[in-house]
Amino acid sequence: MSRIRPYALAATTTAALLATALSPTADAAGRPARAAAPADAAAILVERAASLGLGAGQEMRVRDVVIDADGSRHIRYDRTYRELPVLGGDFVLHLSPDGDYEGADRATTASVALPSVTPALSAPKAADVAAHALRAAHPGEPLRRLTARPQLVVDALHGTPRLAWRTRAAALDARGNPVARTVLTDARSGARIDAWDTLESAAGDGRSLYGGTVPLETTPAGSTYALKDPVRGGTHTGDAANQTDLCLLGTLCVSRAPSTVFTDADNHWGDGTAADRASAAVDAQYGTAVTWDYFKARHGRAGIAGDGKGSYNRVHYGNRYNNAFWDDSCFCMTYGDGDGTTFGPLVSLDVAGHEMSHGVTSTTANLTYTGESGGLNEATSDIFGTLVEFHAANAEDPGDWLIGEKIVRPGFARGALRFMDRPSRDGASPDCWSPAVAALDVHHSSGIGNHFAYLLAEGSGPKTLGGVAHHSPTCDGSTLTGLGRARLGAVWYRALTVYMTSSTTYTGARTATLKAAADLYGTGSAEHRAVAAAWSAVGVN
């Protein structure tokens, strides 16, 4: 990953700085335009260090590069301060095709400069705070194998930058399933700054549980076939054997649940029932393939990280585990079987698209999973999960704007996890923005982004899609005509990958999507005006 140090002008020559910037990015092979972009930007970072808030002790690392068809470049950076990660230090630098500076989007405009990076609060004390927060989030429930790993960071997400401990606490609940919470603690006063759930959740050919008989790309393995897709980066699906990870702390994990790749003698997988363990694997592998195909066909993105490399799936995880989650540390998707009462196996197509889209977000805007940015993170996954479902055009699971309708059991009164046409139908998500949105759980604050997306794509009023009745009101009494799902996806993807940052709020999302619409369709175009109207229709002005 290339590094540039514009702060070091007093001690480093510009020539040395440019030489440092010429070191290639980790995934630059075969991608000369992307590899060259950070080098082209190095001199601009030096020239504009003060206006970009890049001061002494700071170091930038390139996380992602987007090259437009006209050659415009958008280079996304993460930042450290005296070798500590800066939460909210990320920014995107925008260059013209000729390499001229055109602007920047920054997660924070505050000056990152601290008198000391020596904490007054010890790491063990920070770990205790996080462990207590995890227990408090699961009152009356015994937690086993609880671990907490503090990391010293600079918090620039919550006002004036300060030294903080970011601690991820993880444990197993009474049924042996994982629970985890990240806690941000002031490293001087010991006060808790913020906390959020760490698991980003929702919930040949093969006979799947939810999608009928579906095509699968597999790999010959001797006299059998492995459920591994050579066309899509080697993506594969394995059986977790109803076991769980001993922890969820990356390098601190003693071990992970197994992921034994499924094999089959005749390349016809599953029987369409839960009695055959391969049936859930069919859904997971199919969901991965369709998600890959959607991002490739619609956005030119090869794989979750955009590097052509596949992820992998684990199915049958835990004991009646009512969840599915994407985990950056293993670059993998994990699916529980559900408790059989509320949820069945959580391997439906929209859930798969939702969870893998968390991986896309983490490698681009990296929206912090709390407050309004957390709601946008979840909304992004709901939006792309829905667009994946429509893209599949599967008659057994036609596209709609409900999330998780296939996995809920008949006794689940609402019939789905979330409703993007009218989020309040779930009993907890708001249809319209208010200052209270930031305090909601991210699966509910996502309602604002979901409602915006539905209105932009489909418009207001009644409509039947995928055999499901939809009816979307507006908060300002307006009547909207939708632009269609393709243009929604194009606007949201460009906003996510080019303009949003880790601290983007709903107001910031309005700005980012308007910029994206202007880039794609022109300032003042019908699409540009429709984006503005859809945000106003959900109370974001």
Image: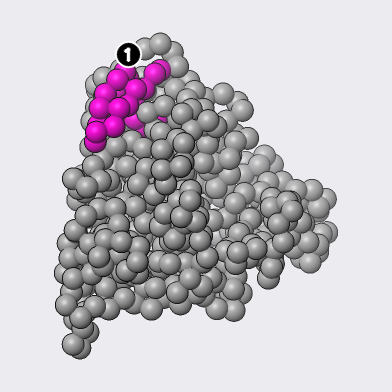
* In magenta stretch: residue 502: no
Q: Nearer the viewer, residue 470 or 49?
A: 470
397 to 38, vertically: above or below: above
Q: Nearer the viewer, residue 448 or 530?
A: 448
Measured from the top left, where is residue 153 in percent x and y? Answer: 66, 58
151 to 183, vertically: above or below: below
Quadrant of the image containing the N terminus: bottom left
Q: Nearer the viewer, residue 270 or 106?
A: 270
Report if residue 385 is visible in the image: yes
Which residue is label 1 attached to?
Answer: 479
Measured from the top left, where is residue 537 in percent x and y? Answer: 41, 19
- Outermost residue on the top side: it is 477
Q: Which residues are magenta?
A: 450-474
Measured from the top left, where is residue 45 in percent x and y? Answer: 46, 51
Measured from the top left, where is residue 173 in percent x and y? Answer: 64, 62
504 relative to 491 in the view: left or right = right
Which residue occupies 43% across, 67% down? 316
125 relative to 92 in the view: left or right = right
Which residue occupies 82% across, 50% down? 189
Amino acid at the residue labelled 1: Thr
512 relative to 393 in the view: left or right = right
Which residue occupies 57% across, 64% down? 177
Q: Secondary structure at mark 1?
A: loop
Report if residue 104 is visible in the image: no
